[in-house]
Amino acid sequence: MNSSFVLYDINKAALEKFISIQSKSLSQKPIHLAKSPVEVAEKASTVITMLPDSPFVQEVYLGKDGLINGLDNSSFFIDSSTIDQSVSKDVANQIINKGARQIDAPVSGGVVGAEAATLTFMVGAASEDDFIKAKSYLSHMGKNIVHCGNLGSGQIAKICNNMLLAISMIGLSETMNLGIKLGLEPKLLSEILNSSSGQCWSSEKYNPCPGVMSNVPSSRNYEGGFGNKLMAKDLRLAINAANLTQATVILASVTQQIYNFLSKSPDYESKDFSSIYKWLDKNGK
Amino acid sequence: MNSSFVLYDINKAALEKFISIQSKSLSQKPIHLAKSPVEVAEKASTVITMLPDSPFVQEVYLGKDGLINGLDNSSFFIDSSTIDQSVSKDVANQIINKGARQIDAPVSGGVVGAEAATLTFMVGAASEDDFIKAKSYLSHMGKNIVHCGNLGSGQIAKICNNMLLAISMIGLSETMNLGIKLGLEPKLLSEILNSSSGQCWSSEKYNPCPGVMSNVPSSRNYEGGFGNKLMAKDLRLAINAANLTQATVILASVTQQIYNFLSKSPDYESKDFSSIYKWLDKNGK
Amino acid sequence: MNSSFVLYDINKAALEKFISIQSKSLSQKPIHLAKSPVEVAEKASTVITMLPDSPFVQEVYLGKDGLINGLDNSSFFIDSSTIDQSVSKDVANQIINKGARQIDAPVSGGVVGAEAATLTFMVGAASEDDFIKAKSYLSHMGKNIVHCGNLGSGQIAKICNNMLLAISMIGLSETMNLGIKLGLEPKLLSEILNSSSGQCWSSEKYNPCPGVMSNVPSSRNYEGGFGNKLMAKDLRLAINAANLTQATVILASVTQQIYNFLSKSPDYESKDFSSIYKWLDKNGK
Amino acid sequence: MNSSFVLYDINKAALEKFISIQSKSLSQKPIHLAKSPVEVAEKASTVITMLPDSPFVQEVYLGKDGLINGLDNSSFFIDSSTIDQSVSKDVANQIINKGARQIDAPVSGGVVGAEAATLTFMVGAASEDDFIKAKSYLSHMGKNIVHCGNLGSGQIAKICNNMLLAISMIGLSETMNLGIKLGLEPKLLSEILNSSSGQCWSSEKYNPCPGVMSNVPSSRNYEGGFGNKLMAKDLRLAINAANLTQATVILASVTQQIYNFLSKSPDYESKDFSSIYKWLDKNGK
């Protein structure tokens, strides 16, 4: 296939890094640097976007220089941002009304998953065809591409998963901290939980207590990983969605407040979300 | 081995059930019905107790007709009650000071695990010898016998596990309820969580949303399983232990209040602990 | 002053009630029934609106038949709705950009306060002149007209007050329920709190425990008063505002979840917000 | 009346301070320094105790050198400690069974109240006579002496009041912090709350936001006042009592965790309980 890249990013360093990596790749492809989102839509038939929050997605897709002003009937948009599910649906519907196609495909798996191409993409698509087309691109980056339902459902799946992850992480941190204070050996407690009904992804793959596992953020002073700010943002999206549907989310709402607190706390704002363990253990120090 | 049973229970029906099952067993052993705990200690060298709360353990072990008044140097006591870890340690130390041996061995796995002899026993023992001796008996009932540390540590491991289980169950219930209200298909949401970082024992083995799994309490109107009252009790023990050590347990403390509420609610008091899903979904109906 | 009324309401019964009351008044004024908001703006120089939530305010002010299309330079709008403070500011700024004036003036005091003309109005106004003009109208309905600051600040003051009120009400209900379960006489407990540092508006004026006070909702099975649905809405606005500013609101967030739950619970949705006492005491029955 | 003092304290500095103050008093009375609690009971007919937690009360009253071993039929004990209400009742009943009288009389009002003799005493007494006798002594130190009911009810009233106080204080701190972040002027917000349904003792007498009031801990970097450790202890007693009666206390339980956290946090452990405002505003700094 005779393909090329059209790039746009307000962060020039990210563009340079991409160009540098491509230049060392076996299958070098032509790269064009666009001057605006609208130029990306004009020059590329399949466009992948990843932006940090809802207003940016609205601006990049629907703004004056937005993708919407450069699309045609063959345009296909994959938005991998994690944003408000109602905004995601609304933007996609406006794009589709102009004759193009769009799906939402938020991602989980972190930097490690991205580098190893083992990310999970949760896809909301208006049709099975859209999903299949998206999968053909996303499978180069991830190994688990799930069709969650109609437009916006990728966002819903993502915030549901992260909401449960955050609750489990705080629950696990409280549990490890309590057990250790009561005299249990950390690794043994971890093994007991993992072989019992307390098991969860965090207890098995991402223990927040230093010394229990190597190669996780808790073993390197909570550097790297998935930051408290990102978790706070995802929880805000979850609470917004809960308010919209009037679903009761008691633990999630306390959990949001805790991650909001950490995300603004000088010593914790740039740490991995498992640093909640340290916060509990050291009483905020 | 030339062994026999010495039984004592204030619940006569439980005694009769035991006798009836034994009478159909291939290896029938003599049964003696004791008139008090003290007589049990006098007639049996290894004694297994399972009682519903701390004061009962104190009465049965240390009371006027308690085991302490019938023990000798060869007595070995296995207490499988789930009780306050400080009471557990205190009772065991008094027994040990009289020259006998005692361990704590609370159990998880439920009625299903008991019938299939696949229970997990979490053992607190003062020595490796005590643990090995206990294991020789407990392995007839369970397949996972873990030495958690010194006296009381079985209790600590048990309440830690159940505290995390309860938090995960409420977190999962909030998540399933939110996702479904936002339009996700329940089984699909369950699969997404199980293949992502939201995975936990409850999501994989004990989904609280009716229709997702068969053979779990949620598929039979939350009958059977592990009741809200028992979970409320274990959480009370966890909070007591946290207060003793001043460990911070924010989600656990809200979780305790929710299970306390359910355990006193006419429609929920006799239901499985996964009925929190229904409570959230039906707003208490 | 030679004045008249221009009325518009999609609820015809409300219009008829107004007309009926006016017809019995000493100072009968001409009434004109408008066919749309735009006609109200065309025929009246001072317009007072009170609507149940943010989207309605946007529609009535900015919609196709909205007030914005009938205003002129002498138009003065008083919006007494309790809505999202950011929407309130945005709508007012659009009106002001068209050359008219607008203030926000949410109200507290309930049906009793409305009938006795003792309401409190919390006013956000762009200038002292606007506030003074608004006060000349609002003082016919309330006795406490407070200038809270710039546009939107009336909304902020209102949700802050109601957020604290809701937290105090749940706190008081938990306290009364605990004290009574521990054996204290309800009226005596109420007196002790009121003469000590536990005193709050609810303990003094609105005790949620039946039998402590007469003439409050708790003395008439929680009928009348300020409903759980309205409180749930105000708390949602408060949480939205907290998310916007990333202020940490732990108790408020749990409080929102509790009132959200009650506002959807069949037995509680139409009750006064002090019914949280009964919910706690009867475990949801 | 020909009276004298019999003193006992393990803190020698406290004894010296008392002696020094007495020596400057107009009505000097003889002072005897006892060597143990038992000697106090032997030499004094009315004994007032104030101790920091339940185990100390058990030791001082019921221990080997305890008051119980020195009492006679005329002994009258006033325990002003704030302790577990069940321990308080139990100790008093043992003393009464030996033929003496005892009441519980925990106190509120702080150092300021003590120096001005304006303390509030909440009295649990087995009879009206006991209360009247206690009042004759306590009215020298306080101006509000309330008979709360039978033995232990002074403790119950005290922890109920402080539980509500703590909830109100966090609620007020969240409210002030939110309102200020949204742009309201602190003093104006305080005035609005105080004239509306958000009013509480803390908003009127003890505002936690620096600059709103003078002569409160928030105006002097939260020095003095009622410390986070004492509040954490009272909340622990409240939660214990709630667990005993299975009363649901959701906000109180989160509140306990927050004060427990602060009481162990290096920067907050020695601060007044209104420092929760700073903790929220500065995200733990």
Image (cartoon, coloured by chain):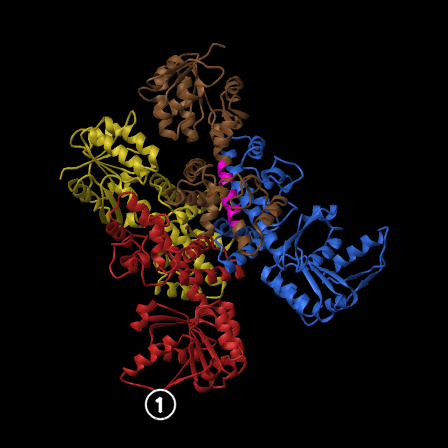
Chain colours: A red, B yellow, C blue, D brown
Chain containing the residue with disc 1: A
Q: Nearer the viewer, residue D70 or D228?
A: D228
Point out the image quarter for the C terminus of chain C: top right
Q: Main secondary structure of the magenta part?
A: helix
| Magenta span contains residue D164 | yes
Horizontal side of residue C111 vs D161, given as left or right: right
| Magenta span contains residue C89 | no
Residue at label 1? Answer: A2
Where C87 falls versus D5 (above or below)?
below
Where B153 falls versus B37 (above or below)?
below
- Residue C206 screen position, x and y as percent: 62, 40
Q: Residue at x 45, y 47 (%)?
A: B258
Where A74 falls versus A59 (above or below)?
below
Residues rendered magenta in the picture: D162-174
Residue C281 visible to the viewer: no
Q: Amino acid at mark 1?
A: Asn
Q: Nearer the viewer, residue C171 or A37?
A: A37
